[in-house]
Amino acid sequence: MKLDLKTIQNINLFEKVTNAKVKDCIFREGLVFIVDEGQVQKALKGIRKVSSLLKQDVKVIGFSSEPEKFVRNLIYPVRANIEAKDMEVIVSVEDARMKGKIFGREKSNLMWINSLVGKYFKGFSVRVE
């Protein structure tokens, strides 16, 4: 993973304001910070200040060492049944609207989720049912 100067500056500012340890920073319709396990509450306390300092929308996602929990954090607030089988995380959703939120326009959300899961959990992929 290569970080440019702007990303490093954003991570440093976020960590100083919130005292939460950042694992990754991604530019996607604003800034998305992935914070270590158990650091989400710390990060949420200073999110408004960080957003106003950076003049961008800021979203916080909690990392987890278990792929199921990480996918649950990625698709929040959508509620779904999530289980891992044979290097694949299976997301089961009853409601078609919720399934649409996970897929996104032209499956852009699902591709983004798959890229993050593949980045942190080698060989894993996400499938929606």
Image (tube, rainbow, N blue to C red):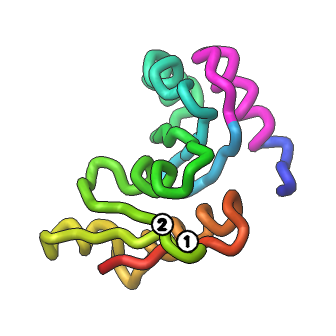
Circle 1: residue type: Asn
At 28% from the left and 48% from the top, the residue drawn is 77
Stretch in magenta: 7-22
Q: From this viewpoint, is residue 7 visible?
A: yes
Q: Residue 117's x, y, as percent?
A: 60, 63
The secondary structure making up most of the magenta span is helix
At 51% from the left and 51% from the top, the residue drawn is 70
Circle 2: residue type: Ala
Give the left or right position of residue 121, taking residue 68 as reference: right
The residue that disc 2 covers is 84
Is residue 69 within the magenta segment? no
Give the left or right position of residue 61, taking residue 4 as reference: left
Q: Within the image, what quadrant is residue 5 found in?
A: top right
Residue 72 vertical placement versus 15 (above, below): below
Instruction: Determine the secondary structure under disc 1.
Output: helix
Q: Residue 4's x, y, as percent?
A: 84, 49
Residue 8 vertical placement versus 39 (above, below): below
Quadrant (top left/top right/bottom left/bottom right) for the N terminus:
bottom right
Is residue 8 within the magenta segment? yes
The residue that disc 1 covers is 114
Residue 21 vertical placement versus 87 (above, below): above
